[in-house]
Image: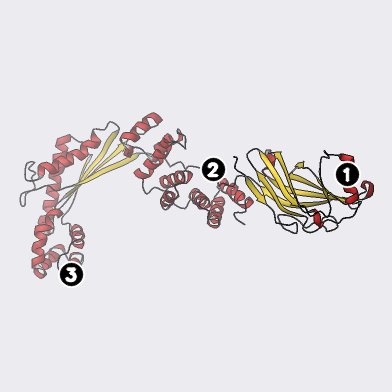
Amino acid sequence: MNKIFTIIAASVLMISGAAAKEVPSSQLPDGALSDVAVERSASTLLVSMKVHPEVFAKKWNREVKLRPVLVSGLDSLWLEPVVIAGRTRYYQNLRADGNTPGYVLLRAGSDKDYDYSVNVPFDSWMENGKLELVSEIDGCCGDGLADPANNDLMAFDFRDKTIRPMFAYVKPIGEIQKMRHVEGKAYIDFPVNKTVIYPDYRSNPKELAEIKRTIDQVRNDKDINITSLTIKGFASPEGSYANNERLAKGRTEALIKYVGDLYSFPKSVLHSEWEAEDWNGLAERLRKSNIDNKDAILALVTDTSLAPDVRDAELKKRFPEQYSFMLANIYPALRHSDYTVNYVIRNYTDVVEIAEVMKTAPQKLSLEELFIYAQSLDKDSPEFREVMEVAVRMYPDDPVANLNAATTAVDHGEYDLARKYLQKAGDSAEALYTAGVLEAKEGNYDKAKILLQKASAGGIKDADRLLNDMLDWGFIN
C-alpha cells in the first residue's frame, strides 16, 4: 500500500487565514463543508470533503454550483462539481441529465451528508498549491443570481522538506616543503666525570640501539631526505655548575661524534647543544612526586634569582633527607640526551601512489595530498570517509582537516562525531555553514538560522538557498 500524505483543513467552512477564506453567506452558508483534505500517494492526488446539504435554503427553483479547482502558479485542474438544488431544480436536473450528469447532484435541505471524493493522477506541478472553490447561484432557467465567488479552501505542500544541503569540502593549503621530524630521549651512561662513550657500558647498548633505530626509520626511506640531526645534552644539578657544564658539553659532543662516525653524516647535518643542569626537568618530576616538603623544595628549585650552585647547596642543607632521595631516584633521569631528526618528504601527485602510501605510511602525506586522493573518490564511498578520518588523525588540530571530517560526519548522520570535529574546525564561513547544517539536521532551526546567516555574510551561497528552503517550509520566520 502506498504511503499517503494528507493535509486536512478545518472541520467546517467558517475558517480563515491560510486554510480557507470565509465565503459570503448569500452563496455558501456557514457549515456547508467540513473535513476538507488533500492527500497524495505516489501516483495520485485525492481531494475529499464532506458536504452538508441541510444548511442550504430549500428554494424550489434555485441551485448552488460548487466547483473545486486545484491551482499552482499558472497550472490548474477543475474537479467534479457539486450542485445543491432546491426541489424544483433538483427534479429538473434529474430529468435533464439522467444518471450521468457529470456532476454530483444533491437536494438542498437534505439531512444526508455527502462524502465528496475525487482521485486524479498526480503531476509534478501539484507538489504545492491550493484548493479553491468557485461557487455560483443560478435561479430559474439557469439565470445567474450573483457573480461567481472564488474562495480559497486550503493550501497544500507535498514538497520534500528534508534538509538536503550542498556539502562543500575545503581544499587545504599546500606545503612548500613537507618538513617533519622525529625525536627521542637517550640516557647514556658515562663513568663518573668522564665524557667518553663506552658502547657496552651498562645500559648503553640499548640506548644507542634506540637512537640508531630512530635514525634508520627515516634514513632508509627512499622518499625522505634528512636535513639535520640535533642532540642536546643535560647534566643533573648536583656538584659545581662549571663541572656540570663541562660534562654536558663533552658528553653531547661525544655522542654527536659517535653518531656521525656511525653514518658518515656531513658535518653540516649534525648539531649539538647542551644545558649544564636540568633544573626544569627536576621541577617537573618533583611536581609529580609525593616527596615530603614538596612545595618548599619546589619553591627553592624554581627560584632563578639564586645561582645554580647556591640552589644546590641550599637543597642539601635544608632538606638533607629529600636531597638524598633525589640523588638516588630523580637525578639519574636528569642526565639525558634529547635528539631530533629533521627531514623532508618528497611530494606525491599520483592518486594510486597516494592511496598506497596512505595504507602503509599515512604520516608521509600532506593534507593537500590526502585531499587530491579524496577528490578522485565518490564522496559516499567508504574509501572517501576513510581519507577524511586519516586526515584528521594525522593532523588532529588542523581546522581544515577537522572541518572536512565534520562535513563528512554530518553527511552520514553522525552528528555527535560532527560536533566533536567542529570544536576544532575554526570559525571560517565554511565552518559556520557546516555547523548551521548540523543544527538544521537536528531540528534546531533558530540556531541554524543564526549560523547560516553568518555563513551567508561570509560568502557561502548555499547558505542562502538553505535559509530560503527553511523559510518556505515554515521552519523559521
Q: In this view, does 102 lie to the left or right of 252?
A: right
Judged from this view, the residue extending furthest toward the right is 141
Viewer-nearest of discs 3 and 2? 2
Q: Which mark is residue 352?
A: none
* Residue at image coords 22%, 44%: 230
**Crowd rating for badge 2 (residues with CA inside 10 Å; few <14, some 14–19, many 20+):** few
* Residue at image coords 74%, 45%: 71
Q: In this view, does 184 lie to the left or right of 317?
A: right
Q: Kindly identify the amino acid type of the residue bearing the numbered disc 2.
A: Met
Viewer-nearest of discs 3 and 1? 1
* Residue at image coords 70%, 56%: 11
Q: Quadrant of the N terminus?
A: top right
Camera sees residue 257? no
Mark 1 lies on a secondary structure that is helix
Q: Position of residue 474 (x, y in %)?
A: 62, 54
Task: Name the residue beneath numbered marker 2.
Answer: 166
Pick the residue in front: 258 or 403: 403
Q: Residue 93 carries which label?
A: 1
Camera sees residue 34? yes
Q: Kindly identify the amino acid type of the residue bearing the numbered disc 3.
A: Ala
Q: Kindly identify the amino acid type of the residue bearing the numbered disc 1.
A: Asn
Q: Position of residue 382 (x, y in %)?
A: 42, 37
Mark 2 lies on a secondary structure that is loop
Q: Quadrant of the C terminus?
A: bottom right
Q: Residue 296 carries which label?
A: 3
Measured Cα–Cα span from mark 3 to mark 1: 111 Å
The vertical placement of 389 against 21, above or below, is above
